[in-house]
Amino acid sequence: IEPFKKLLTQGMVCHETFQTKDKKWVEPDNVIKKENGYFSMSGEKLIKGRSEKMSKSKKNIVDPDYIIKKYGADTARLFMISDSPPERDLEWSEEGIKATHKFLKKIFEHLNNSFEFSMVFNRKNSRLNKAELESYNFLNKTIFSYSEDIKNYRLNNAVAKLRELSNLLIKLEKKSSLFNYSWSIFLRLINIITPHFAQELAFNAGFKKNLYEISWPSYDSESLQSSHVKIVVQINGKKKFILLVNEGVEKDELLEIIKKDIKYKSLNVTEFKRIIYVNNKILNFVG
C-alpha cells in the first residue's frame, strides 16, 4: 500500500543555452549580456541557443546555492511555484527571481513594525467604507479560492490570487483593525510557501508562536455570497452536484476544476457530445 494518494511530479526546469563559435557550451554564470549580444568572460561573442532542460552536458545549470544566498530560499520557492503549473516545465530566469524578490521586499517594508498581528475581526461591529468593504469581501474570496487552488495543486493560480490580494490590501489605512486582520490572514496563507518571510513579519507584529501551529484561516460565508455563485452540474438534465465558484467563471475554468478535483474523478468530461453552460447557473453534460 502506497503511503499517499497521489504523486505529483515536477516538470523539467529549463534555461537558455550558450555556445562559442566552435560549439563549446558556456555556463550562464560566465555569460555577460550587453546591448549587442552575449559575451563570455574573456570577451568572445556567444551564440544564444533555445531554452532546454538543465543538464551538465550543455552547462545550462544555475547553482541554487547562489540564488538562495543572494535572494533567499523563500524567493526561490515562490518564483518556482508562481511561474507555471507544477506539472509543466519551468522556465528559469534571473528576471523572474528579481521580480519575486521585489514583491516580497515591498510587502516586508510596508508591514515591518507597522501592524499588529490579529486573529479576529468583528465585521458586525465595524463600519467599513466602500474601499474597506471591497477589501474585506475580496479577502474572504481569496481565503476560499486560495484554499481550493492549494488542495487541487493549482499552485501558480494560488500565488496569483495572493498578489492580487496584496495589491488591494496595500491601499488600506495602516493601523486600522481591518488592516491588521487582513495582513495577518495574508501571512497565514503565504506561510506555506514563504515560511521565513511570513514568520518574521508575524513575530515583529507581536505573534510569538509558530504560524504553522494555528488553524487554517476560515472565511466569512456571508461575505462570499456577493462574489461567489453556485453552479448546478447536471448530466442529461439531472442534477449531480453543486460547485461554489467565483462569479463570472468561464466554462473552461469549470471543466478544469472538475478534471483536477479527485471528488469528481468518475465524471469524464470528454465522453459527452455537448456541454451546455448557462452563465453563473448551470453546467449540463449531454450525450
Image (cartoon, rainbow, N blue to C red):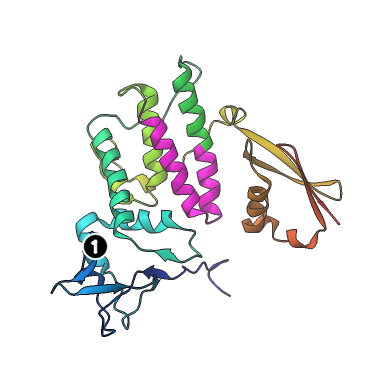
Is 98 positioned to the left or the right of 40 in the image?
right
- Of residues 84 and 219, the one nearer the viewer is 84
Q: Position of residue 168 (x, y in %)?
A: 41, 31
Q: Position of residue 253 (x, y in %)?
A: 63, 49
Extreme residue toward the left, this view: 42
Q: Position of residue 143 (x, y in %)?
A: 50, 39
The residue range painted magenta reads: 142-171
In terms of image quadrants, where is residue 14?
bottom left
Q: Amino acid at mark 1?
A: Asn
Question: Most prominent secondary structure in the magenta stretch?
Answer: helix
The verdict on residue 175 being magenta is: no
For image coordinates 31% across by 58% down, the residue present is 76
The vertical placement of 51 against 172, above or below, is: below
- Of residues 175 and 46, the one nearer the viewer is 46
For image coordinates 79% across by 62% down, the residue present is 271
For image coordinates 42% across by 64% down, the residue present is 90
The vertical placement of 192 against 222, above or below, is: below
Say if residue 243 shows up in the picture. yes
Q: What residue does disc 1 label?
A: 36
For label 1, count other residues whose C-alpha is less than 10 Å away and answer few (under 14), some (14-19) or many (20+): few
